[in-house]
């Protein structure tokens, strides 16, 4: 009998914690750097359509590449949330974005973003 893969929160968190140091390089490699263009297009779409972006939540934010692009919108604040604490540690070093636990706060948001998530 084939054992089904472990899809528990702990297993997924562990998997992303393990790949966190190489995540950016892997993401660019697997998407042939198209991910860079996606993020730029997201910001262009938001600003070009006058979408309110005062308080932003970047959900499944990984190492913060989307959050770094969203800073160009001059929001009041960007919150970043991810299941992987290692991803958030890297993001904090890269960008200085405010990191928080999604389930411990009440938020007033204008914009909820996610680029690549499972």
Image (cartoon, grey):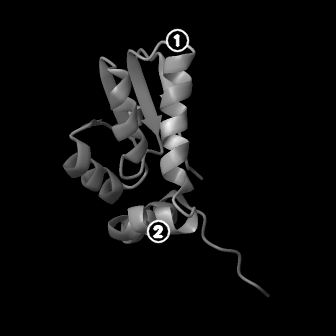
Quarter containing the N terminus: bottom right
Extreme-bottom residue of the structure? 1
Residue at 52% x, 11% y is 50
Residue at 53% x, 52% y is 35
Q: Position of residue 31 (x, y in %)?
A: 57, 61
Q: Position of residue 113 (x, y in %)?
A: 51, 33
Q: Which image quarter: residue 66?
A: top left
Residue at 34% x, 39% y is 68
Can you see residue 106? no
Q: Is residue 78 left or right of residue 51?
A: left
Count of number-bearing discs: 2
Q: Quick one: 79 or 35, which is closer to the camera?
A: 35
| Residue at image mark 2 | 26
Residue at 56% x, 54% y is 34
| Residue at image mark 1 | 50
Q: Quick one: 65 or 107, which is closer to the camera?
A: 65
Name the secondary structure under disc 2: helix
Q: CA distance from mark 2 to mark 1?
A: 33 Å
Numbered badge on residue 107: none
């Amino acid at each position: 009998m084939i054992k089904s893969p472990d899809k528990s929160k702990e297993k997924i968190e562990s998997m992303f914690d393990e790949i966190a140091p190489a995540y950016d390089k892997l993401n660019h490699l697997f998407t042939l750097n198209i991910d860079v263009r996606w993020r730029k297009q997201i910001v262009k779409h938001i600003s070009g359509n006058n979408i309110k972006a005062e308080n932003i939540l970047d959900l499944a934010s990984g190492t913060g590449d989307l959050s770094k692009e969203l800073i160009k919108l001059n929001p009041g604040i960007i919150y970043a949330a991810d299941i992987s604490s290692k991803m958030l540690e890297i993001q904090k070093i890269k960008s200085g974005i405010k990191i928080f636990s999604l389930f411990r706060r009440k938020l007033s948001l204008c914009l909820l973003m996610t680029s690549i998530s499972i």
